[in-house]
Image: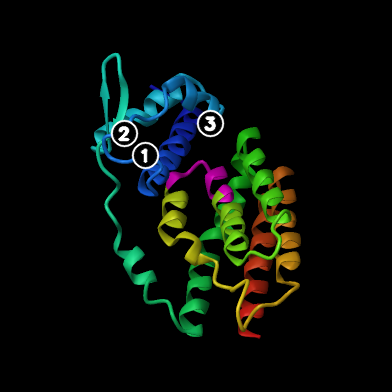
Amino acid sequence: MADAHGASLADRVEGELRSDIGHGAWQPGELMPSEGDLAVRFQVSRTVVREAMSRLRAAGLVETRRGRGSFVLARPAAQDLTHSLGTVRSLSDRLHLLELRRGVEVEAAALAAARRTPAALAAIDAALRRMARVRGSASDAVEADFAFHRAVAVATGNRFYLDLLDTLGAGAITRPYAGAERDPGHLGHVLTEHERVRDAIAAGDALGAAAAMRTHLDASRARLSG
């Protein structure tokens, strides 16, 4: 039986692979990367990868063929919340979405600080570097912003945080980076706020990470309302 640490690693790998399959990284019938390649990608042991893959097999998402590898069978079923997000049109809807994120992501930041691993922290840092490189592209800015929040969810070691954020998708980033509401300084403000969350997580400061994430989402709400 895997220990708690091994279980959390398997949760993370399973969650990310589910997300990749759901987003079409591999189509049904397509061969997935080898166990060894996945172990290198996620910086975990092959035992952890095997556990994650066994869960995907149990869910009917993949099939392992002896001597050939694992093949995708189906994508995860779409969730109702995905469809409800299609109705997010008004300012009120967007503010309510931020309230939902506040209720989830503040605790996620605290858990990330308590459970962070070198690999999880490296992913958070990579997301910050990605945001720092954004130059004028609204879609790139939204994706980079979302990548940071997703990396924090991964760092919790609880796949359900990641599942929820992936269900919300980049639509969870409610402040436009282009159009009539564009704020030229918005990206810089967000990057600074993200860095404060990252620093608290890296320091293992759960209360500080929660406070920094709360401050960030409250600032997002203020910018959206203003």
Residue in the foreground of this view, choosing between 156 and 222: 222
In the picture, the quarter occupied by the C terminus is bottom right
Q: Is mark 2 on a helix, strand or loop?
A: loop
Mark 3 = which residue? 42
For the point 60% across and 46% down, the residue is: 112
Q: Identify the residue at the far front of this view.
A: 136
What amino acid is at disc 1? Trp
Q: What stretch is highlighted in magenta?
A: 151-159
Q: What element carries label 1?
A: loop
What amino acid is at disc 3? Phe
- Horizontal and vertical percent position of residue 153: 53, 50
Residue in the foreground of this view, choosing between 209 and 178: 178
Q: In this view, does 64 lie above or below 29?
A: above
Q: Which of marks 3 and 2 is in front?
A: 2
Q: In this view, does 58 lie above or below 64?
A: below
- Horizontal and vertical percent position of residue 206: 66, 50
| Cα separation between marks 3 and 2 | 20 Å
Please say if the residues under marks 1 and 3 sit with CB atoms less than 8 Å apart: no
Residue 30 badge: 2
Q: Residue 68 occupies which quadrant of the picture?
A: top left
Residue 26 badge: 1
Please say if the residues under marks 1 and 2 sit with CB atoms less than 8 Å apart: yes
- Horizontal and vertical percent position of residue 61: 27, 38
Residue 17 badge: none
| Magenta stretch holds residue 199 | no
| Cα separation between marks 1 and 3 | 17 Å
- Give the mark nearer the N terminus: 3 vs 2: 2
Q: Residue 119 occupies which quadrant of the picture?
A: top right
Q: Nearer the viewer, mark 1 or mark 3?
A: 1
For the point 71% across and 43% down, the residue is: 202
Residue 106 vs residue 162: left or right? right
- Give the mark nearer the N terminus: 1 vs 3: 1
